[in-house]
Image (spheres, grey):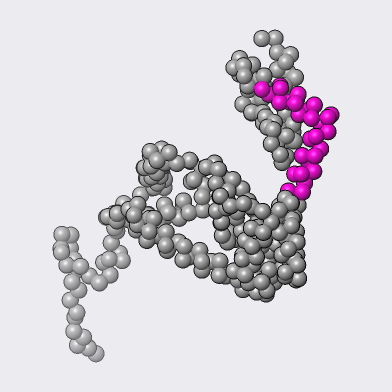
Amino acid sequence: MSTNIPEVPVDIPRDGDLRVGPLDPFLTRRKEKQPSISAAFKNLKICKEKIGRATSRWFFFNSISANAAKGPYYESMIETIGEVGKGVEGPTSYEIYNKYLDMEVEDMKAYVSTFKRIWDEYGCTLMCDGWTGITRRSMINFLIYCKAGTVFWKSVDASGKVKNTNYLFQLIDNMVEEIREKRIVQVVTDNATTFKLAGQKLMDKREHLYWVPYSAHCIDLMLEDICEDPMVENVVNNARFVTTFIYNHNNILDIMRTHTHGRELLRPTPTRFASQYIALDSINGQRGNLIRMVAYEE
């Protein structure tokens, strides 16, 4: 018995034939050579070095501290530049101080607004801190603390103002109104007499508020009083004499740095707070090295 089955011609591409079958892309070998792992790491190392040279040159030319690279936005800046790629110009100084600064301010306002819900629910603490800058301008900073963290609220330039009780009371009272009285549980300032009296007036006006002095400032005042003891004062003066003598003689200073392995001594300064005790702790920590330095034959 015979069957008439038509023969289907099979067209097989030969070498040099330009025709391509539907399965050829899956069966033929790719002509591209995959880079080796060592080559890929070498290329990555070269790219990192180019980025390092360019960014470091920018740091050096503009006298920017290298510690700025530890900031939270340094790596994100590098990543964003890499994602965007070539052909995009950087922002101008005018754009940075105008367009982008305004955008950052709006973002920060939106971030602070997220804390206000916590202030409404749990309350917050208004903190007031005064300081004098290198230009001798007197500034008073206001910060707000809550369970979610601390945010900076406002800075007031008090230069040329008489910082008496009435001025400080009016300033703090205005901040309470601005933040809303129902949100604030307590107001914290330093323990100066004017702040203390201003806090008392604030509690008289707003009965649910409490004025509390800084614990750190109270401790600093205690340490300052201890320094007035003749025995403690004598120890601090001796430590100041030793460090002044060492740092006024280069040869002795070099010997000290050799024995302390390059570590410096903190010198007591005639200021309040805990600087004297920190300096004494620094000297005591190098006690053994200082003894070896004195016994050094040279």
Q: How many marks?
A: 0
Note whether 261 is above or below 70 in the view shown: above
Q: Seen from this angle, which residue lies furthest left?
A: 17
Magenta highlight on residue 281: no
Quadrant hosting residue 117: bottom right
Quarter placement of the C terminus: top right
Note whether 259 is above or below 84 in the view shown: above
Q: Position of residue 174 (x, y in %)?
A: 61, 66
Viewed as shown, does residue 112 lie left or right of 63?
Answer: right
Quadrant hosting residue 241: top right
Q: Nearer the viewer, residue 21 or 290?
A: 290
Q: Nearer the viewer, residue 180 or 94?
A: 180
Q: Position of residue 288 (x, y in %)?
A: 75, 24
Note whether 243 is above or below 188 in the view shown: above
Q: Which residues are magenta?
A: 216-244
Viewed as shown, does residue 207 lie left or right of 72?
Answer: right
Q: Nearer the viewer, residue 156 or 219?
A: 156
